[in-house]
Amino acid sequence: MPLIKAFAQASTSPLSLTLLLASRCLAAVEGGRSLTEALGKVPSANRSAVQAVTLYAMRHWGRARAWRAMTLKKPTGQPWVDSLIALSLLLLDVAVAPESSSTDAPRYTPHTLVTQAVDAAREGRAKPVLPGLLNAILRRFQREHRQFLDNIKTDPVARWGYPLWWQKQLQADYPHDWQSILAVSCFAPRLVLRVNTRLTDVAEVLHEFSEAGVTAVHLGESAIAVTQTGSVDQLPGYTEGWWSVQDLGAQRAATLLAPKSGERVLDACAAPGGKTAHLLELAPITLTALDQDPDRLIRVGDTLSRLRLVHSGVTLKAVDARNLEQWWDGKPFDAILADLPCTASGVVRRHPDIAWLRRVADLPKTVTQQAKILDALWQTLAPGGRLLMVTCSVFLQEGEQQAVNFLSRHPDARRLPAPGHLLPKASLGDEPGQDGFFYGLFERAVL
């Protein structure tokens, strides 16, 4: 996106700039790249505003795409302009009927939005005919708003905001709950932190937040929910390593594995490092953390450094966990955290682009990959040791069915109590909500 930097320096309109940068990020997602990656290329001064707009758009992208298809006969030849059209239609829907929109919807007056969207098209160097086309599309949408709403009532993708294959998979897995699972993604998650009890405690963090005018509430154990805007690294205690950002559902992983003092522990798929850090916060252990992506493993190291958790007993290795000959020294582990790769279908309220990036063929691929990792890791577990299988997925194939199949392949595995599938919950009122996860805990028999 070479024009982003130049435009960011030249533009005098914050809204038109936000719309331009957001449309380029959305075009990147439609081209197969993650929203996180795209946002990382947005100038830091503009990132917060662009992130708010793009996250809202992704949560309602089914409607945006449907309305774009009704108004645009063929692609413009400039993907970011196609995305700008879809984004502008979605935001104009909020502007025309703000009372029916979700609380996280960006709000502008219709006149302001139309004017600034057209300015964004011009300043972003759209083809000469396209700003006028965008203006005509938005004016028509404003005049015929009720008809546009009626036209998507029978479109399940527009209605629920997910690709059709995704919806069918959830209907098959959860015939009674699939609609509520889909609806959760329409609600933005609250920011949840995990206090680093190695350095401080919940009371001290809450006090510092209060002094800084930040609203925060204790959720239990070391979790707190925070109401804030802007960058998290500006919150009190970030630099000091007092806390980490971690969803309430994800915070259950380390406590379920329950590391004990002196144990030899493996975190087999460690990046970005939140669960790795939590394990080290709970007990003085010897820990090996693996990730096959060297760049992501650097993030693990950075996280542990910020939290003051690096010591001689911590080893980081950039390696595929399945290739035991490349990393395992033959000494068995007392406990293993297997945070397996998956479709990430449980965290779409936090990363709504996931649903649009995944394809139906991805599911059997991740299931096969998971099984190979589990089978490899089981060989490294000591008799009497514990293995916690974790996925941030609600699809049964990546959770309960995988666990059942694992038990059938390993007669020396005994299943211990664990939550199984945790379905996602929206953040409403005083409830922080949670992402969707699967937790399966196994013990290796002593023969």
Image: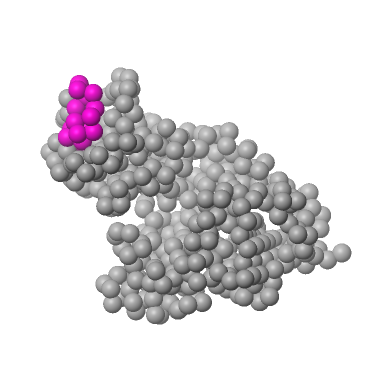
Q: Is residue 430 visible?
A: no
Residue at figure coordinates x 28%, y 73% from the top left: 212
Residue 334 in the image, given as x and y percentages of width and height: 72, 67
- Quadrant of image for the N terminus: top left
Residue 10 in the image, given as x and y percentages of width and height: 19, 41
Q: Is residue 288 visible?
A: yes
Above or below residue 312? Residue 188 is above
Magenta stretch: residue 69 in it?
A: no
Q: Which residues are magenta?
A: 117-131
Residue at figure coordinates x 50%, y 37% from the top left: 358
Q: Quadrant of residue 28?
A: top left
Count of numbered circles on the image: 0
Above or below residue 344? Residue 215 is below
Residue 40 in the image, given as x and y percentages of width and height: 38, 47
Farthest residue in the top direction?
Answer: 73
Q: Main secondary structure of the magenta part?
A: helix
Residue 66 in the image, given as x and y percentages of width and height: 34, 30
Q: Quadrant of residue 147?
A: top left
Farthest residue in the left direction?
Answer: 111
Residue at figure coordinates x 36%, y 63% from the top left: 233
